[in-house]
Image (cartoon, rainbow, N blue to C red):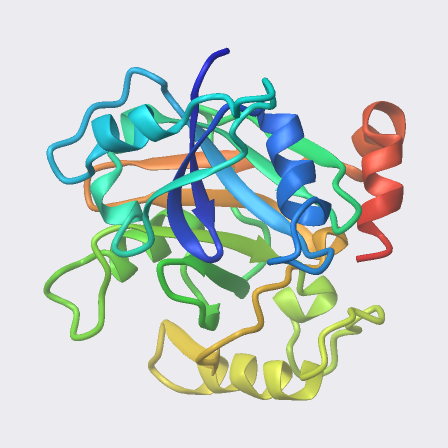
Amino acid sequence: METHIYLLLFPESLVMSMLGPGEFGAYLATGTKKRAREQAMYFELDRSFESEYFDLDKASKSCVSHEDGRPKHSVYVSTYRVLEHVPLNVIGDLWLVTRDGRGLALQPSETQEENEGQYHLYQELCPVHPLIASRMNARDFNSFITNPEVTVSVPRICFVEMDLAELADDPSTGNSRNLPYNDIEHIRDCLLELATKDKTTKTINRIQHEHIPYRCVKRGFFVGDQTSILYYPFPSFEDMQKHHHYWWRSAELD
């Protein structure tokens, strides 16, 4: 059986498994007592990935079938500083898994659409988890967060842009359209601060809960550093209804 390599976003970790990406997601979300029916997000890495930082050979020797023939579900390679040591050129599909184990694979796109709206809401996913309001588009935000000359930065970042509804252009009186964020008025206040002060970013929450309301994803997911950025477009509502109906129905319940 083939061995796969996955980069989990939360908790940040590098894992080898004999399960294919769909089966692996179902296992993470529903098939282990370590997780109680939770979302899972992970990148599938190129199986030719080699590293001087990770001991992949040792993990590979442990990733073998059980005596009864069952595949090995997971062998943890590392749980510390993983994303910064995985080059962008080996990162493949991004898998989004609902709490009942349904998986959706997003492919990286070479074309990055322009961000709509004057203000943006970014949920950082890995290696840190703040919720950030910003006047920067996704590409500029990525460059800012990974800039080593900035006081607080990370070598590489994965984040998602979340929907702001009418607040994206009018944080003062815009309609939030019943967005399910618990702190919507605080978000509005932070956007207003960006509008009135010479700031490009404002931290809304320093440690956001590791749970994404998939139905509120706006543009898509991003992973990048100072040299490059990968963009994973999120399907439109019409696309979801037509091609990913069951995943979308499950995601709406998350």
Instruction: Out of 219 and 89, give the one closest to the viewer.
Output: 89
Residue under the point 60% across and 45% down:
219
- Name the quarter where the C terminus is drawn: bottom right
Tell whether 102 sits left or right of 34: right
Residue under the point 21% across and 53% down:
155
Give how far across and how far down residue 202 sits, in percent. Answer: 42, 79
Give how far across and how far down residue 3 sits, in percent. Answer: 43, 19
Tell whether 79 sits left or right of 166: left
State whether residue 234 appears in this view: no
Which residue is at the far top? 1
Compared to 156, does 123 lie above or below? below
Tell whether 233 sits left or right of 103: left
Instruction: Out of 242 and 254, give the one closest to the viewer.
Output: 254
Give how far across and how far down residue 240 sits, in percent. Answer: 81, 33
Instruction: Out of 86 and 17, give the one closest to the viewer.
Output: 17
Instruction: Out of 160 and 75, give the one closest to the viewer.
Output: 75
> Residue 154 sits in which quadrant?
bottom left
